[in-house]
Amino acid sequence: MTSTAKLLDFYYKDLSDTLERLETQRRGILRKLRNILIALAAVVVLVFIVARILTPRPEAFVVAAAFVALAVGGFVYRQLSETYRLNFKRDVIHPLIRAVSPSLRYDPEGKIPQELFEYAGLFDDDIDRYEGNDFVEGIVEGTSLAFSDVYARRRDTDDKGRETWTTIFRGLFIVADANKHFSGRTVVLPDRAEKLLGSYLGNMLQASNFTRDSLIKMDDPAFEKVFAVYGNDSIETHYLLSHSMMQRLLDLRNSVGEDVYVAFKGDKIFIAVAYDKDLFEPSLFESLFSMRQAMEFIGTLKQAVGIVEELRLNEKLWSKP
């Protein structure tokens, strides 16, 4: 895979004219937003002055005006930032992805299909709202790969009819060719029970998870502290999760610094990495020439594509029958 140094060189040199154009657009949007906010603030002040003259209790009018001003400001911000966002993804992220590998195809509005997300079996909840973007697919190091942002939520209603939304998963979702058809199911989940309750109680709670297949104990203490493994074929699970694969999953968890979920099913490996932000969203309030922002875009991209190398999927650990 292309090195970070080469991608930075591509970003700052090959895309310099594009960055200058988008930077001009970004600063122009900020000026417009500033002027609009000043105008809206002036309207709220004017409403306060007029209301104070007309009524002894102007607070309600001021609050209403402030709410309207916030709504208008939010709408204008979304409209202006959306144009900038789409231009950035088309003119910066797309060529940057191609620089990583010409085989990769990028669709900023696409996502991993919900059916494939549910098929992986990593999350038990029924999904009421499924969203995503920044879809990438292609061949990396001889392995078919696809990934995107995914945001899956569940709707709950209490006995008074009040509605709340619960996040099932938000982050990076990856589908890779496993080069083998698995006869059973194996899922590797973050081990929160053992972390919170200790080894004994945590294992009891894991084993009583009736929404999952059987809990399968692994013989790697370091792995067991971080992950819980469930499957319906213990022999295949132990075959898949060799000592080298368990170490690679631990290395992956340590490198991303977030919760990692893995499923082996059908002829695919599914990997979910929890994030609380979208993959390639530019900030209106930070220069595109900022090294921090450049490294964030490049680091996220290399992290997503690099999982193939991290797990050595290109070595074809399993051969298809």
Image: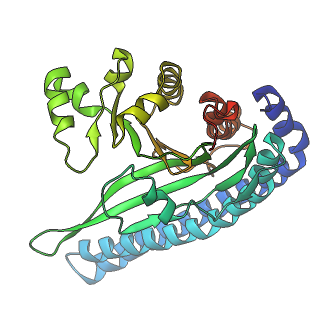
Looking at the rendering, which quadrant does residue 60 occupy?
bottom left
Residues 297 and 30: in front is 297
Where is residue 184 shown, x and y percent of the image?
A: 42, 46
> What residue lies at 35% left-to-right and 54% top-to-bottom?
168
The residue furthest front is: 321
Quadrant location of the N terminus?
top right
> What residue lies at 39% left-to-right and 53% top-to-bottom?
121
Residue 247 visible? The answer is yes
Quadrant location of the C terminus?
top right
| Direction from residue 199 to residue 319 in the image, left or right | right
Where is residue 30 shown, x and y percent of the image?
A: 65, 57
| Direction from residue 106 to residue 320 in the image, left or right | left
Q: Is residue 118 above or below residue 69?
A: above
Residues 315 and 321: in front is 321
| Direction from residue 210 to residue 171 in the image, left or right | right
Q: Is residue 117 above or below residue 174?
A: below
Total numbered labels: 0
> What residue lies at 64% left-to-right and 36% top-to-bottom?
308
Residues 67 and 210: in front is 210
